[in-house]
Amino acid sequence: MTTFTAPESSTPDTGSPLVIELWTDLGCPWCYIGKHRLEQAITTAAAGQVQVVLRSFQLDQDMASTPVSVPEVFVAKHGGTAEHARRMESQMAALARAEGLPYSVDRPAANTFDVHRVLHLARAHGVATPMFSTLQRGYFAGELNPFDDDVLVQVAADAGVPAEETRALLSGDTCAQAVRDEQAAGRALGITGVPFAVFNGTHAVAGATHVQGYATAIAQARGASA
């Protein structure tokens, strides 16, 4: 865990609620596990009112928009064989399932920029976290294809975002600069990978730490604002 002085892009503590900013990317399996552990820590820590703000951070901004298999992406980025990539995915699947999370190794992978744009639209409607949670769980379960516009529209609509607004966003460049700005704000914090959580602008946890690690950060952030 790292303690630092937050720049203006990070949300300062106002006493209540505790604000947790979580930089994340849909295609990242550690973000899936890390968010689950953070949610458990919030319950475990009994920290009172907590506001989780999901922030955009694309791990691969140059990834193609046309979906391919996860093993193909792994081999293209890291080398090796598709068989090795599937073994690595199987290990992640076992880890996720041990925590009660569904995980399919047979899921598509593509550029997540549009997902982040819809996330920003959902935030404007106050439903970013439930929308993203549904999309993330469905994606890793192999039940939803987030790179299909119709799927994004439906998931957002189910969360409370009018379908016509999501379709209009996807047909243009709405929220594009907001995503880029948030990515830049993350890099200004020194973020190079996700998940990355900032607690009340004073404490940070890089990576998907264990539940107790997040609970400790919550307690320390609360103590710093007391």
Image (tube, helix red, strand yellow):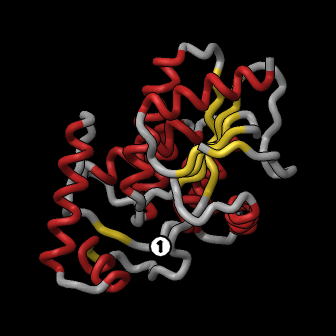
The answer to whether residue 34 of the structure is visible from this angle is yes
**Quadrant that contains the C terminus:** top right
Label 1, secondary structure: give it: loop
Judge whether 193 appears above or below 11 on screen.
below
Quadrant where the N terminus sits is top right
In the image, taking residue 117 as reference, residue 38 lies left or right, namely left
Residue 52, image quadrant: top right
Mark 1: few/some/many CA within 10 Å (<14, 14-19, 20+): many
Place of residue 109 in the rendered image (x, y in percent of width and height, measured from the top left): 35, 70
Residue at 75% in and 38% down: 202
Q: Is residue 132 above or below residue 59?
A: above
Residue at image point 66% right, 71% down:
172
Q: Mark 1: which amino acid?
A: Asn
Q: Is residue 21 above or below residue 153?
A: above
**Residue 107 placement: quadrant:** bottom left
Q: Which residue is mark 1?
A: 111
The image position of residue 195, as x and y in percent, is 51, 52
Q: Residue at image x 35%, y 44%? A: 137
Which residue sits furthest right? 8
Who is closer to the viewer here, 153 or 16? 16
Total labels drawn: 1
Query: Quick one: 180 or 214, which is closer to the camera?
Result: 214
In this image, 7 relative to 207: left or right? right
Residue 164 visible, this angle: no
Question: Which sits in the foreground, 219 or 140?
Answer: 219
Using the rendered view, name the quadrant where residue 216 is placed: top right
When the figure is inspected, residue 8 is found, relative to residue 107, above or below; the finding is: above
